[in-house]
Amino acid sequence: MDRKEIIKHVDHTLLAQTATWEEIRQICDDAISYGTASVCIPPSYVKQVKEYVQDRIAVCTVIGFPNGYMTTKTKAFETKDALENGADEIDMVINLGWVKDKKYDCIEDEIRILKKECGEKILKVIIETCLLTEEEKIRMCETVTRAGADYIKTSTGFSKAGAAFEDIELFSKHIGTNVKMKAAGGISSFEDAEKFLKLGADRLGTSRIIKLVKMSE
C-alpha cells in the first residue's frame, strides 16, 4: 500500500485545547495539499474553517468531546450547531458511565438522535476502547450498528491509550455491514497506519502522518 493511498484514509487532526487559528489553517492547507479524507478540528473553528476551505476538503468536528458525559440534549445542540456552521462529518463521544451502568438503550437512543440530526452527513461514534472491557466493546459494536451510525471509532486520543490493532480486529467481528471503522489515537508511523487499514479500518485519526511526509520531503 503506497503512502498516497494511506493518506486518503486520514482524518488530519488538531484538537489540542491551545490550537490557534494559524495552526488550524496550516493543517487545512496540508490536508488539501496531500489529499486527506478530512480535516478534524474543534467545533469553535468549524465556521471559519468551512469558509476557508470551501469544498476543497471535508470538515470534521467532535461532539461531547473528550469525556462524553454531557446530556443528550447538549450533544444534539452541539451537533446541530456544528452542521449549521458547515461541518460535513461528526465524531461523537458516547457516555461511558452509561456503558458501565449497562444503559445500552440510552446509548443507542442518543446515537439515533445525533444521526437524525446528521441526516446524510457522516456520524462516527467514539467508544474510548481503553476504558472498556472486551464484553463492553462488543456491546458497543452491536449498539452502534443498531443505532445506524456510519462509523465506530476507537478513541479520542485524550485518554490513557489510543488505537490498538486488537480493537479493530474485534470490531470487524461484531459490527454490522453498514458500519465502518476508524482507528484514532497514537498512530505515529506509516507501518502502523497500513496495518490498521489492512485489518479493515476505513479511516485513521492522526496528526502525525502528514508531519512524517513533510519531514521526508
Image: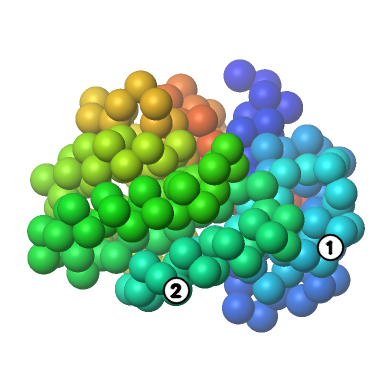
Say above or below: 203 vs 27: above
Q: Earlier in the sequence, mark 2 or mark 1?
A: 1
SS class, disc 2:
helix
Please give the label number shown on residue 74: 2
SS class, disc 1:
helix
For marks 2 and 1, give the CA distance. 28 Å
Say above or below: 119 vs 27: above
Q: Position of residue 6 (x, y in %)?
A: 63, 30
Please give the label number shown on residue 61: none
At horizontal 40% and vertical 54% (from top left) the residue drawn is 113
Give the position of the C terminus as an image quadrant. top right
**On the picture, is 163 further left or further right than 170?**
right
Q: Is residue 4 visible?
A: yes
Q: Kindly report which numbered mark, 2 or 1, lies closer to the viewer in this rendering.
A: 2
At horizontal 86% and vertical 51% (from top left) the residue drawn is 53
Give the position of the N terminus as an image quadrant. top right
**On the picture, is 11 further left or further right than 65?**
right
**On the picture, is 51 further left or further right than 115?**
right
Q: Position of residue 83 (x, y in %)?
A: 64, 57
Q: Nearer the viewer, residue 83 or 66?
A: 83
The image quarter in which residue 86 lies:
bottom right
Check disc 2 and give the amino acid type. Answer: Thr
At horizontal 18% and vertical 40% (from top left) the residue drawn is 138
At horizontal 24% and vertical 43% (from top left) the residue drawn is 143
Label 1, on which residue? 25
Label 1 environment density (alpha carbons within 10 Å; few <14, some 14–19, many ≥20): some
Please identify the residue farthest to the top as the structure is shown.
1
